[in-house]
Image (cartoon, helix red, strand yellow):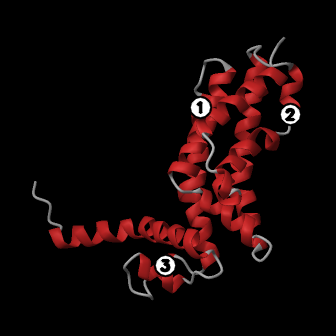
Amino acid sequence: MQDPTPQGEKKRQRRKDARPSEIIAAAMQLWAERGFAATRLEDVAAGAHIAKGTIYRYFPSKEALFEAALQARIVATMDRARDMAQGFDGPTSQMLSGFFETIRTELVDGGSSVFLRVLLSEGHRFPDLVARYERVVLSRGMSTVRAILAAGVARGDLRPEAADCDPRLVMAPAMMLSLWGTVFTTEGLPDMRSALAQHVAILMGGLGRR
């Protein structure tokens, strides 16, 4: 049966559906270059090649755009990491490595470390952004780490006290490594995969069964 929808209308619909992701990509690029405060929604609209007024149909404020970007990039990554951990049946060390690699890929390769850079440099001016990050990102990450540690205890890879380990201590090195090139530019970028592998070894050495 022939599709009665005109091709031009289909193309316009696909373009409309793609706009939020294009707006988010333009915003992240500008936040990386200028920072959050110096970037106006009008600037983002220009970067996404849309009319100035069009962006307000999707995002009524910069804060709403920031949260949507978090949802699209970091939350989706955290949810993938959670699903990976829930379905994994191998050693806890490999589960931790897989979790960190998923986060590393998005923060470093995907450019999402810009969120941490914004919070580090401008969070004191925009406390609502910090609250949004804690609510939609950190809570998911900590929940996933707790689940990994509990699973490690249940399968006998980790000592019982590992279940009470503060998940922020487990996550902190991955977050710091993603910012290393921003904070300590003279020392160059570390080999993040190698550093995270060492972090997993340290965790297993401290929390693993002896």
The answer to whether marks 1 and 2 mark residues whose Cβ atoms lie closer than 8 Å is: no
Task: Look at mark 3 in the image and give the residue it sits on.
Answer: 44
Where is residue 194? Give x, y as percent.
62, 33
Gap in angstroms between the C-alphas marked 3 and 2: 41 Å
Residue type, label 3: Val
**Disc 3 on helix, strand or loop?**
helix
Where is residue 47? Give x, y as percent.
43, 77
Residue at screen point 57% across, 32% down = 84
- Can I make out residue 78 in this image? yes
- Which of these two is toward me, 209 or 80? 209
Crowding at mark 3 (Cα within 10 Å: few <14, some 14-19, many 20+): many
**Disc 2 on helix, strand or loop?**
loop
Gap in angstroms between the C-alphas marked 1 and 3: 34 Å
Crowding at mark 1 (Cα within 10 Å: few <14, some 14-19, many 20+): some
Gap in angstroms between the C-alphas marked 1 and 2: 19 Å
- Can I make out residue 79 in this image? no
Give the residue at the far bottom of this rendering.
Answer: 53
Residue at screen point 60% across, 52% down = 75
Residue at screen point 80% across, 44% down = 168
Where is residue 107? Give x, y as percent.
58, 51
Instruction: Name the quadrant containing residue 123.
Output: bottom right
Taking 91 as reference, is 162 above or below it?
A: below
Residue type, label 1: Gly
Residue type, label 2: Cys
Q: Is residue 15 left or right of residue 25?
A: left
**Disc 1 on helix, strand or loop?**
helix
Task: Look at mark 1 in the image and give the residue it sits on.
Answer: 98
Q: Which is nearer the N-term, disc 1 or disc 2?
A: 1
Q: What is the quadrant of the N terminus in the image?
A: bottom left
Task: Look at mark 2 in the image and give the residue it sits on.
Answer: 165
